Amino acid sequence: MRSTLTSPATTQVESMPWRAWWSFRNTLVLARRGVAHIVREPSQLLDVTLQPLIFVLLFVYVFGSAIRVPGGGNYHEYLIGGMFGMALVGTAQGTAVGVSTDMATGLIDRFRALPISRSAVLAGRVIADLLTEVIAIVVLVITGLAVGWRIHNGVGDAVLAFGLCLLIAFAMTWAGACAGMLVRNPEAAAAVGFIFFLPLVFVSNTFVPTQGMPAWLRVVADWNPVSAVASSCRDLFGNPNPSSHIAAWPMQHPELATVLWSIGLLAVFAPLAVYFYRRKSL
């Protein structure tokens, strides 16, 4: 009778590519599920459609006349460059609420009973949320063009700016997934998002230049990842960027700082989110 046993080394070699492919397919299926859920409930898109629109109109037409850009320049163009970072980073709160809702409704328990990769559950959610970020970019481009914002440095630099926005959004979405795994209900997740993500956006150069802030707060704002991505967008779009005259290293190298922040956030929060999910699966 032919033996079906294989050596441990052979099993490991054969199983590793298969496990990676299996996990990848699981992730795509769950990402498709997340997109389908959003299509059925379009209200989930309010944070990437209506919210950025409100912020743009509020700061352009209500506060814009009182804000001066150091060195001169159009505040409308200054604002829109920063809004790309604000809109994309801020959606991490939506991921936290979504993951917490899945936990509270028992959906995660059903996933645990299925023969699927554990990391794919969170990765699928993150990818689905990342696809909504593209909608946020489209909304901001249309809104910005309507209020006078323009791209001056060509299509190549603009595509690079959008890519950096999606990269930092991907990293921050994992932070949101991690937060969603730690809280008990969606209300708590929303509160966590308000406490941590909102100050991250406002203590930055998104809406106002950091030169007018107190010295200690200016240091925090200049090293904020939101400030890095906002400065990157302004440089690449050719918009006014007074932060380029600040000596802080992230403001002198905003594109590199955005990439490093993204890698660091992914290295910390992606493994943590999967770890917390596995602990809850025990």
Image (spheres, rainbow, N blue to C red):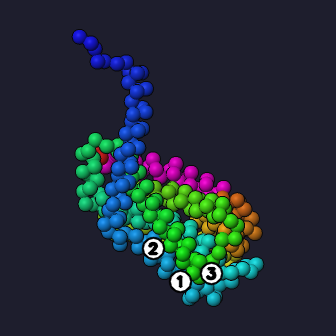
What residue did someone put label 2 on?
49
Please tell me whether mark 2 sits on a helix, a strand or a loop. Answer: loop
x, y (%) of residue 14? 40, 27
Please tell me how crowded label 1 is: few (under 14), some (14-19), or many (20+) other residues with Cα within 10 Å: some
x, y (%) of residue 55? 51, 79
The picture quadrant where one finds residue 153 is bottom right
- N-terminal label among 1 and 2: 2
Please tell me whether mark 3 sits on a helix, a strand or a loop. Answer: loop
The picture quadrant where one finds residue 160 is bottom right
Please tell me whether mark 1 sits on a helix, a strand or a loop. Answer: helix
- N-terminal label among 3 and 1: 1
Residue in the picture at 26% in, 44% down: 114
Q: Give the amino acid at mark 1.
A: Leu
Q: Give the amino acid at mark 2.
A: Thr
What residue did someone put label 3 on?
148
Residue in the foreground of this view, choosing between 121 and 131: 131
Q: Are marks 1 and 2 in contact (CB under 8 Å)?
A: no
Residue in the picture at 35% in, 43% down: 117
What residue did someone put label 1 on?
57
Residue 254 vs residue 103: left or right?
right
Separation (CA) of disc 3 from disc 2:
19 Å
